[in-house]
Image (tube, rainbow, N blue to C red):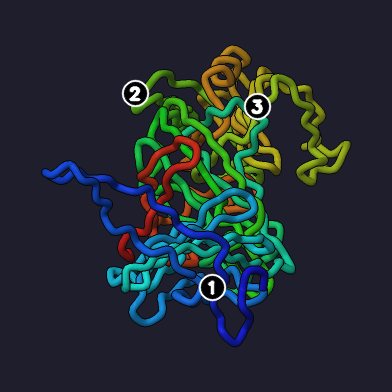
């Protein structure tokens, strides 16, 4: 090991001395006397380090003073310039790293020690952490293609580069993910499958909140040979709290902004055999013009139910093709009957108004329909249809977190709350 006397001694070799500036004093008689300075000594024999050869980055690095000696300072710096945080024991005999070591990284260690006999010195050594066989990275969502402002129903998403199945390894993944928001909320992770996680608060996000999602524990061990790779961060904001409730029984859409009813719109929803899904959905996207063809939902071309239409002001709520959109052909039925193939239809003017007043992440909830319940995953964001208790059970840590902290770059992380 570079800078070491060898495996037998396990001691760091001196690379320099701590030099103290002399302190002068004056006597009443005018003669000068100097205060006694600590004697410069070889600090190598005063300390023992835990690192020999290549080091497992999942293990803490320690420096221990030999009998009678004390540590006065330890600094561990990676080749990337990051200083590893650590804690010096109250008796100054042991320093232990508390910060995380990165895999495949060279570290320089500067140690200052006191021999307890008036001597003090400095030594420098180094070690290298084992290179990871596999690095786990994370694609954070929502993606950055939008404006950065989302509705209060928008879940945070993580897509891992590798499947993680082991429960303990999943815990390490969750520890590597942090969510902070201003104002703070209580939230939790849900493992959708081995590579995908969603995060949502217990209730909807607050209006006009700032939110930061980070995957930032580089070098941390996830499982044998798998370590956290390059960090990534995603920051978004929420807009007003927008909730649109579609009552398929009364054929009305009630639009609320920040709890206040802004508009009530007559609509038509899915007719028998094509009934609209019940439940809470999240706006996925908006298209001013979209082509809709019945064959995409299993309707045979040329059949009685077939259609091929150019549709305007379409707000998407499922990937399978459910929209809130303009349906000028069914105005006579809007507010009266359900005649669509599953979408929520309204007049062109009302659809344009709804389109302009809505953004990705806003809530659209359907009630009193004869249709099935919205799927939790796979067809959009049905996350809010899962009870909070069941949601938390699908966290590897089985605990909610608070998102208290700063959304400024480089600061803060959510912390665990007591078990529910």
Q: Closer to the N terminus: mark 3 or mark 1?
A: 1
Instruction: Work out whether residue 327 or residue 30 is closer to the camera in this orientation and state it.
Output: 30
Can residue 373 be seen in this snapshot? no
Instruction: Work out whether residue 81 or residue 275 is closer to the camera in this orientation and state it.
Output: 81
Q: Is residue 344 left or right of residue 200?
A: right
| Residue assigned mark 1 | 59
Mark 2 and 1 residues: CB-CB less than 8 Å, in contact?
A: no
Q: CA distance from mark 2 to mark 3?
A: 24 Å
Q: Residue at x 36, y 82 (%)?
A: 67
- Tell me where residue 37 sits by quadrant: bottom left
> What kind of element bears circle 3?
strand
Q: Residue at x 61, y 74 (%)?
A: 4
> What kind of element bears circle 2?
strand
Mark nearer the viewer, 2 or 1: 1
Mark 2 and 3 residues: CB-CB less than 8 Å, in contact?
A: no
Q: Is residue 290 left or right of residue 335?
A: right
Residue 262 x, y percent position in the rendering:
40, 19
> What kind of element bears circle 1?
loop
| Residue assigned mark 3 | 286
Residue situated furthest top in the rendering: 349
Residue 225 x, y percent position in the rendering:
69, 72
Question: Which labelled disc corresponds to residue 260?
Answer: 2
Q: CA distance from mark 3 to mark 1?
A: 49 Å
Label 3 Cα neighbours within 10 Å, binned few <14 / some 14-19 / many ≥20: many
Label 1 Cα neighbours within 10 Å, binned few <14 / some 14-19 / many ≥20: some
Q: CA distance from mark 2 to mark 1?
A: 54 Å
């Amino acid at each position: 090991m570079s800078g070491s006397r060898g495996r037998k001694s396990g001691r760091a070799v001196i690379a320099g001395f701590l030099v103290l500036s002399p302190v002068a004093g004056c006597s009443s008689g005018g003669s000068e006397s100097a205060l006694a300075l600590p004697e410069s000594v070889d600090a190598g024999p005063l300390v023992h380090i835990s690192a020999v050869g290549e080091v497992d980055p999942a293990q803490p690095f320690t420096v221990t003073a030999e009998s009678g000696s004390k540590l006065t300072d330890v600094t561990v710096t990676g080749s990337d310039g990051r200083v590893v945080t650590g804690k010096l024991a109250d008796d100054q005999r042991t320093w232990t790293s508390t910060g995380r070591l990165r895999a495949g990284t060279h570290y320089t260690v500067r140690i200052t020690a006191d021999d307890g006999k008036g001597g003090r010195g400095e030594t420098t050594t180094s070690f290298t952490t084992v290179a990871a066989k596999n690095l786990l990275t994370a694609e954070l969502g929502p993606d950055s293609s939008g404006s950065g402002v989302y509705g209060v129903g928008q879940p945070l998403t993580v897509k891992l580069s590798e499947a993680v199945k082991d429960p303990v390894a999943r815990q390490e993944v969750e520890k590597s993910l942090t969510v902070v928001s201003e104002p703070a909320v209580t939230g939790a992770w849900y493992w959708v499958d081995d590579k995908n996680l969603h995060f949502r608060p217990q209730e909807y996000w607050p209006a006009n909140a700032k939110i930061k999602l980070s995957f930032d524990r580089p070098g941390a061990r996830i499982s044998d040979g798998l370590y956290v790779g390059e960090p990534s961060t995603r920051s978004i904001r929420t807009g007003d709290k927008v909730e649109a409730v579609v009552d398929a029984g009364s054929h009305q859409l009630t639009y609320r902004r920040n709890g206040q009813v802004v508009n009530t719109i007559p609509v038509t929803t899915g007719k028998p055999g094509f009934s609209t899904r019940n439940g809470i959905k999240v706006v996925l996207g908006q298209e001013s013009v979209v082509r809709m063809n019945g064959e995409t939902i299993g309707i045979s071309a040329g059949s009685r139910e077939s259609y091929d239409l150019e549709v305007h002001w379409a707000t998407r709520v499922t990937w399978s093709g459910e929209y809130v959109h303009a349906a000028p052909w069914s105005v006579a039925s809007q507010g009266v009957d359900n005649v669509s193939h599953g979408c929520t239809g309204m007049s062109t003017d009302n659809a344009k108004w709804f389109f302009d007043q809505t953004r990705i992440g806003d809530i659209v909830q359907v009630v009193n329909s004869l249709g099935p319940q919205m799927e939790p995953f796979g067809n959009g964001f049905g996350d809010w249809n899962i009870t909070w208790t069941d949601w938390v059970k699908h966290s590897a840590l089985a605990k909610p977190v608070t998102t208290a902290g700063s959304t400024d770059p480089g600061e803060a992380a959510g912390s665990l709350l007591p078990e529910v």
